Image: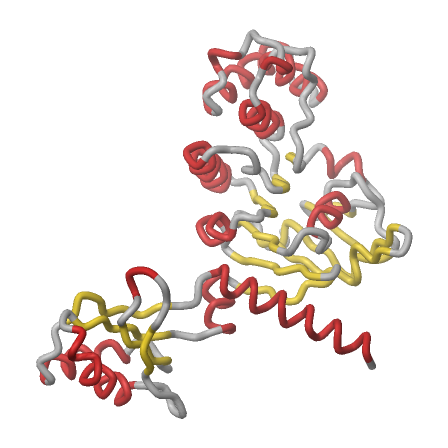
Amino acid sequence: MSDLVVRAEGLRKRFGKTQALDGVDLAMRRGTVLGVLGPNGAGKTTAVRVLATLLRPDAGMAEVAGIDVLKQPQRVRRRIGLTGQYASVDEDLTGTQNLVLIGQLLDLTTRDARKRAVELLEWFDLSEAAARPAKTYSGGMRRRLDLAASLVGHPEVIFLDEPTTGLDPAKREDMWGVVRTQIAQGSSVLLTTQYLDEADALADEIAVINHGKVIAFDTPNGLKRRVGGLTLRVRPSDPARIGDALKVLDAVAAPGTNASLDTAAGARAGAVAVPVAADTAIDEALPALRRAGVEFTELGLHLPSLDEVFHALTEEKTESKKESELV
């Protein structure tokens, strides 16, 4: 059995003059979360719709759970769960009826479908509203019902297209718990999201899409190292010792770099920072600071945030596209 539960190569899709997918390659390992990031209009949802058999590409191939999505879409649909960007429940049915209906469509017995509905409604904190029509639900409640619907059949592969849009912070974290539970139970999850902290918290690997192309693919930490590398940051207890801290960090800096004042906003202002080649730099800096008599309130290694990575990658790609259009 292949380690890859999702594989796509050279996916292309055009809508009129818009090239939504321009040769997208994706790979997701079994039992992991693949985060797919990109600006609005980058092609994320189009890629998900192709993989979920809702849209045929103009070119390329894709397999989900080892099944060709173009040749055997019905088999694929029985192995997946999908939550789109917008809740798609039947508003005239109750929460329970929505989930039971989906279970019956998946060939569960009525008894098993009801049992699964009760389990999911409790899981998503919807038990008290189970007997109410979905049209009486708030936007967040409908979203949670939609998420529950995607899990009725215990899918092997789950596609979550911006699943926490419209949820408050507490419910977002609840959803993160749902994703982790699904992975622990043997599912694999492809997650698109606009929340970079969400991708950082959940994804084992991340694909960044821009202008219909995958422009980067790596683990979250791999992307961070690729864009900015490690930085060692120190904030002296006494601001007057900044100069001494600079001298210490200069001694452990990566070749060709120097320590500098960290003028970032907030609590880090007034610190000093230096790019370092490896995490062992902190082992050199700590005794050197003590020898110099520099006390500190912060000493740590930092990678760029995923926000910084995302903006660096997408802005670089946008600039490259503009330059190519001028040639």
In this view, the residue in front, 67 or 274, is 274
23, above or below 74, in the image: below
119, above or below 210, in the image: above
- Residue 219 % position (x, y): 51, 62
Residue drawn at x 22%, y 66% is: 298
314 left or right, relative to 300: right
92, above or below 9, in the image: above
- Residue 66 % position (x, y): 70, 48
Q: Quadrant of the C terminus?
A: bottom right
154 left or right, relative to 119: right
In this view, the residue in front, 56 or 290, is 290
In the image, farthest residue toward the right:
16
Q: To which quarter of the image does residue 209 belong?
A: bottom right
Residue drawn at x 83%, y 58% is: 19
* Residue 284 can be seen, yes or no: no
In the image, farthest residue toward the bottom:
256
- Residue 58 % position (x, y): 88, 53
- Residue 287 % position (x, y): 14, 80
In this view, the residue in front, 132 or 259, is 259
Residue drawn at x 47%, y 67% is: 224
* Residue 275 can be seen, yes or no: yes
In this view, the residue in front, 59 or 44, is 44
254 left or right, relative to 8: left
